[in-house]
Amino acid sequence: MRKFRIDETPQFFNVLIGEMSLVGPRPERQFFIDQIMLHSPHYRHLHKVRPGITSWGQVKFGYAENVGQMVERLKYDIIYIENMSLALDFKILFLHCKNYFSGAR
């Protein structure tokens, strides 16, 4: 189930009710937010946009397993926020689907 990320399917319900977007920075648990803020106080900028199922950081970096990787992925999410557009959202969705179906992370 985890291998194919089926466990993330319920997040589509959150998109339907407006709590999440298809594209936007991936939400983190508060424990990790506190850890990230110690290294990168500019993480708070991610809270200016609705979280998403996939993101520029997700496409370019992949899943983060520790705080160091989360900080690295943060750089891509900041770039997304600074350059948000419908065209970029479509590009991210296309790349996400391409990576998903090709087996890339």
Image: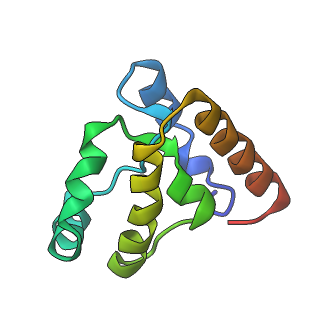
Q: Residue 59: percent from the left, percent from the top?
A: 62, 57
Q: Residue 86: percent from the left, percent from the top?
A: 58, 28
- Relative horizontal placement of residue 45, taking residue 68 as reference (left or right): left
Furthest residue toward front: 83
- Relative horizontal placement of residue 56, taking residue 96 as reference (left or right): left
Furthest residue toward top: 17
Q: How is the image coloured?
A: rainbow
- For residue 36, which quarter of the picture? bottom left
Q: Residue at x 20, y 73 (%)?
A: 35
Q: Residue 31: percent from the left, percent from the top?
A: 20, 65
- Relative horizontal placement of residue 73, taking residue 102 as reference (left or right): left
Choose between 93 and 1: the one closer to the eye. 93
Q: Residue at x 38, y 78 (%)?
A: 66
Query: Where the N terminus falls, by quadrant?
Result: bottom right
Choose between 4 and 50: the one closer to the eye. 50
Choose between 83 and 59: the one closer to the eye. 83
- Relative horizontal placement of residue 31, taking residue 25 as reference (left or right): left
Query: Where the C terminus falls, by quadrant?
Result: bottom right
Q: As displayed, is residue 47 above or below residue 16?
A: below
Q: As displayed, is residue 42 above or below residue 54?
A: below
Q: Residue at x 39, y 54 (%)?
A: 78
Q: Residue 96: percent from the left, percent from the top?
A: 68, 49
Tell me how many marks there are. 0
- For residue 92, which quarter of the picture? top right
